[in-house]
Image: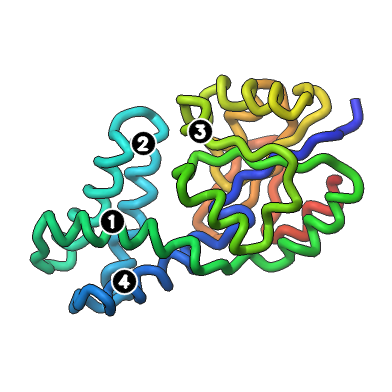
Amino acid sequence: MKIKHVFFDLDHTLWDFEKNSALTFEKIFIENNIDVKIDDFLEVYVPLNLKYWKLYRNEKVSKEELRYARLKKSFDAVNYTVSDDVIEQLATAYIDNLSEFNHLFEGAFELLDYLKEKYTLHIITNGFEEVQNKKMVNSKLYHYFDQIITSESVGVKKPNPKVFNFALKSANARKDNSMMIGDSLEADIQGALDVGLEAIHCVFDDMTSTGKNIVSVKKLLEIKQYL
């Protein structure tokens, strides 16, 4: 069966999360008089954030715990004392400001323009619902996609098969005519493969590995050779 529906992850796949996140922290640290070198903070925050997102998608921590703990543990790691009230203030400011920065990975618009002519495009994201739609509108991605599925709207997170089945039903698609494209080997790729979708793994750095017999790309525009 020929592919008709292409489902994309958003963060780390189309939307350059790390770059936009760093710019957000720079802004809110200045506004809240946080005297920490941003590079020192990000060096510990980035892996901690990934760790807590994995716990979150595996239902080990709540959304509120994720938002608090990733900041608290990062400040502790750089030996910067900050009150819980300030952490909560920063957590809110981070979410409020994150969608104001809209750097996409190289080739995002060119790829989407190309795919839009041939396929129906959709988003499946584990990101917080209140910020994902803002990201897509502000970065001028929204109009490319038919269905935008957030894990919060489903009640479970990728790689839970319920998310993919919900997305297929919402898009009036079938697993045998659909493909998933994303950066997370566990959440996006293995999750999609387990349901029966084809998948392409986006590996944009030299630290991410992919599984055997899994199609992977190092740049978005390489996806053209498969679709």
The residue positioned 20% from the left and 78% from the top of the image is 33
**Colour mapping:** rainbow
Q: Which mark is residue 28?
A: 4
Q: Which mark is residue 56?
A: 2
Amino acid type, residue under disc 4 in the picture: Ile
Amino acid type, residue under disc 2 in the picture: Tyr
Name which of mark 3 and mark 1 comes first in the sequence: 1
Mark 4 lies on a secondary structure that is helix
Q: Which mark is residue 91?
A: 1
Q: Position of residue 137 (x, y in %)?
A: 62, 57
Q: Position of residue 47 (x, y in %)?
A: 35, 55
Crowding near pointer 4: few (<14 within 10 Å), some, many (20+)? some
User: In the rendered view, does 76 fall on the left or right side of 165?
Assistant: left
Question: Vertical placement of 56 versus 95: above or below?
Answer: above
User: In the rendered view, does 226 fall on the left or right side of 145?
Assistant: right
The residue positioned 39% from the left and 39% from the top of the image is 54
Cα–Cα gap, marks 3 and 1: 20 Å
Amino acid type, residue under disc 3 in the picture: Ser
Question: Vertical placement of 32 versus 137: above or below?
Answer: below
Q: Which mark is residue 29?
A: none
Name which of mark 3 and mark 2 comes first in the sequence: 2
Question: Vertical placement of 55 versus 98: above or below?
Answer: above
Cα–Cα gap, marks 4 and 3: 27 Å
Amino acid type, residue under disc 1 in the picture: Ala
Name which of mark 4 and mark 2 comes first in the sequence: 4
The residue positioned 29% from the left and 48% from the top of the image is 67
Name which of mark 4 and mark 1 comes first in the sequence: 4
